[in-house]
Image (cartoon, grey):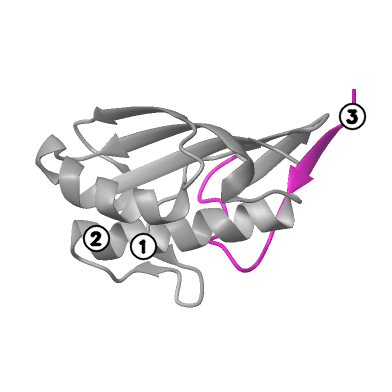
Amino acid sequence: MEILKVATEKAPAAIGPYSQAIICGEMVFTSGQIPINPESGNVEATTIEAQAEQVMQNLGEVLKAAGSSFEKAVKTTCFLADMGDFAAFNAVYAKYFTAKPARSCVAVKTLPKNVLVEVEVIAVK
């Protein structure tokens, strides 16, 4: 089975030895996206809502580049720096993942660049 790397300039470039996403057969596996503005390369948002919006925009571009979309997501994994942000994060998340894929959401001690949220997606093409 052929494995393809996904890359788009409309989402932040990988900040380590990984790809923005991988396509394996009809499945798309995104790397975790954090709220980096791809135009500036910086984390500009400071609230959980604004950071979640940027994460979703980044994920949308990666999924699009892979030939997929939010509607084709089957599983997400969400990482929050503070579980106290759960409700506010959910409000943003629900606008994008309207098909309600399976999901895990956990709080972690620290995320890259000390952001508040990171999300990864498994989707079909």
What residue sits 9% from the left and 40% below the top? 84
Q: Earlier in the sequence, mark 3 or mark 2?
A: 3
Percent from the top left, x then y, of residue 36? 41, 62
Quarter of the figure that contains the C terminus: top right
Nearer to us: label 3 or label 1:
1
Nearer to us: label 3 or label 2:
2
Residue 115 visible in the shown view:
no
The range drawn in magenta is: 1-17
Label 3, label 2: how far apart the Cα atoms are? 37 Å
What is the quadrant of residue 45 in the picture? bottom left
In this view, 95 is above or below 77: below
Percent from the top left, x then y, of residue 123? 64, 36
Which residue position is annotated with label 3?
A: 2
Type of the residue with mark 1: Glu
- Total labels: the figure holds 3
Outermost residue to the front:
99
Which residue position is annotated with label 1?
A: 53
Outermost residue to the top:
1
Numbered disc 3: secondary structure: loop
Closer to the camera in the image, 48 or 110: 48
Quarter of the figure that contains the N terminus: top right
Percent from the top left, x then y, of residue 51? 30, 60
Numbered disc 1: secondary structure: helix
Label 2, label 1: how far apart the Cα atoms are? 6 Å
Are the residues at dot 2 and dot 1 in contact (C-beta closer than 8 Å)?
Answer: yes
Residue 99 visible in the shown view:
yes
Percent from the top left, x then y, of residue 57? 48, 63
* Numbered tag placed on residue 49 in the rendering: 2
Numbered disc 2: secondary structure: helix
Image-based side of 13 in relation to 86, left or right: right
